[in-house]
């Protein structure tokens, strides 16, 4: 049976009303469409844990700082619907911009401090826009559980903090990154890479693995870790490392001396496509 497509907020509420029941749960996977195996991993997890599954498809214009990035973002609604049908999704909510933002939003959600590093300084206003749209979507769908990929680790941390600080009654579930066979994290933006860029694109993953190797072998100076990690990337003019940072996994603040688990995260430009990735790294255990 084909998935139900609804475009209006009132329709989602009406469609979900009979499914709200203390004995069953609604799982929600917010997306910007162009679904790939990373998204289907989220959907399958929601399907296995909840009685009903809702997917939203909305390319949120407010979270794009560059007009060309918004314009080039892949839009594949019919394919997305087919994927949702194949994975047993009950409802797809695909509003247009007017439905989500009938007027300029005077009220936004700002999660402070967590966007001070990593992507935050490079994408001013991005996490405010993400937190705001996710809050709106959570208010519309009112799910019991909402699923997000760990590839967007800063987004996940911001959303977790938002629902905790604002007492939103939802469980946020982080789902591990899905990778291609060469380690490249799946992303809708990978669709923009030409075949030569695609060959180069796992450079960030290789750098992160080098950081992981350094940390697990006992290197404690984050500066050294970042430098050694960046050094494994091929010197190709199409690659530009935007940042590679070592931060604590909770507050995402820089760590100078590594003494516990840390998150190593980076952003790499491959031609005109910006890719992000991260790994949680563990130093050797004392006496180990
Ligand atoms: O990760 C995404 O696809 C988006 O940032 C999200 C969470 C759907 C908000 O627009």
Image (tube, grey):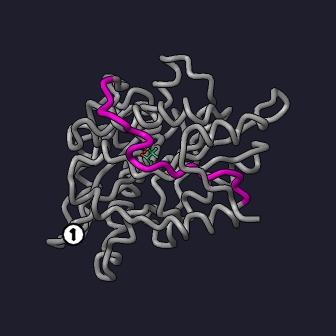
In the image, residue 171 lies at what x, y percent?
A: 63, 30
Which element carries disc 1, helix, strand or loop? loop
Q: Nearer the viewer, residue 121 or 36?
A: 36
Visible residue check, residue 268: yes
User: In this rendering, is residue 266 above or below 37?
Assistant: above
User: In this rendering, is residue 186 above or below 16?
Assistant: below
Q: Nearer the viewer, residue 41 or 10?
A: 10
Whether the residue under disc 1 has CB within 8 Å of ligand 1: no
Rendered-image quadrant of the N terminus: bottom right
Visible residue check, residue 255: no
Residue 90: in magenta span: yes
For the stretch drawn in magenta, the main secondary structure is: loop
Left or right of 134: which side holds 276? Answer: left
In the image, residue 207 lies at what x, y percent?
A: 33, 59
Q: Nearer the viewer, residue 15 or 92?
A: 15
Q: Identify the residue at horizontal 21%, vertical 69% (top origin).
A: 271
Left or right of 190: which side holds 18? Answer: right
In the image, residue 39 lies at what x, y percent?
A: 56, 57
Q: Using the rendered view, name the quadrant where residue 233 is placed.
A: bottom left
Q: Identify the residue at horizontal 85%, vertical 30% (top origin).
A: 23
User: In this rendering, is residue 109 above or below 288?
Assistant: above
Q: Which residues are magenta?
A: 88-106
Rendered-image quadrant of the C terminus: top right
Q: How many discs appear?
A: 1
In the image, residue 70 lies at what x, y percent?
A: 29, 56
Q: Using the rendered view, name the quadrant where residue 220 is placed.
A: top left
Disc 1 target residue = 271
Left or right of 236: which side holds 264? Answer: right
Label 1 Cα neighbours within 10 Å, binned few <14 / some 14-19 / many ≥20: some
């Amino acid at each position: 049976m084909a998935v139900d497509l609804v475009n209006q907020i009132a329709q989602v509420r009406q469609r979900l009303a009979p499914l709200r029941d203390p004995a069953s749960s609604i799982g929600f996977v917010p997306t910007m469409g162009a679904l790939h195996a990373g998204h289907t991993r989220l959907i399958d997890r929601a399907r296995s844990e909840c009685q009903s599954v809702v997917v939203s498809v909305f390319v949120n214009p407010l979270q794009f700082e560059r007009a060309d990035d918004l314009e080039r973002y892949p839009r594949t609604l019919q394919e997305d619907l087919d994927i949702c049908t194949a994975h047993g999704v009950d409802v797809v909510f695909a509003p247009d911009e007017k439905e989500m933002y009938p007027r300029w939003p005077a009220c936004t959600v700002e999660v402070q401090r967590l966007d001070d590093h990593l992507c935050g300084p490079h994408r001013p206003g991005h996490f405010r826009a993400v937190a705001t749209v996710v809050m709106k979507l959570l208010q519309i769908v009112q799910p019991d559980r909402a699923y997000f990929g760990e590839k967007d680790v800063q987004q996940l941390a911001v959303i977790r903090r938002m629902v905790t600080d604002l007492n939103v009654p939802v469980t946020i579930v982080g789902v591990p990154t899905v990778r291609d066979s060469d380690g490249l994290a799946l992303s809708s933006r990978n669709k923009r890479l030409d075949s030569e860029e695609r060959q180069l694109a796992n450079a960030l993953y290789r750098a992160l693995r080098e950081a992981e190797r350094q940390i697990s072998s006992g290197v404690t100076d984050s500066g050294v870790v970042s430098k050694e990690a960046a050094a494994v990337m091929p010197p190709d003019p199409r690659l530009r490392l935007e940042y590679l940072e070592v931060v604590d996994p909770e507050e995402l603040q820089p760590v100078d001396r590594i003494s516990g688990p840390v998150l190593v995260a980076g952003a790499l430009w491959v031609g005109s496509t910006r890719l992000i990735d991260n790994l949680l790294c563990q130093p050797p255990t004392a006496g180990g």
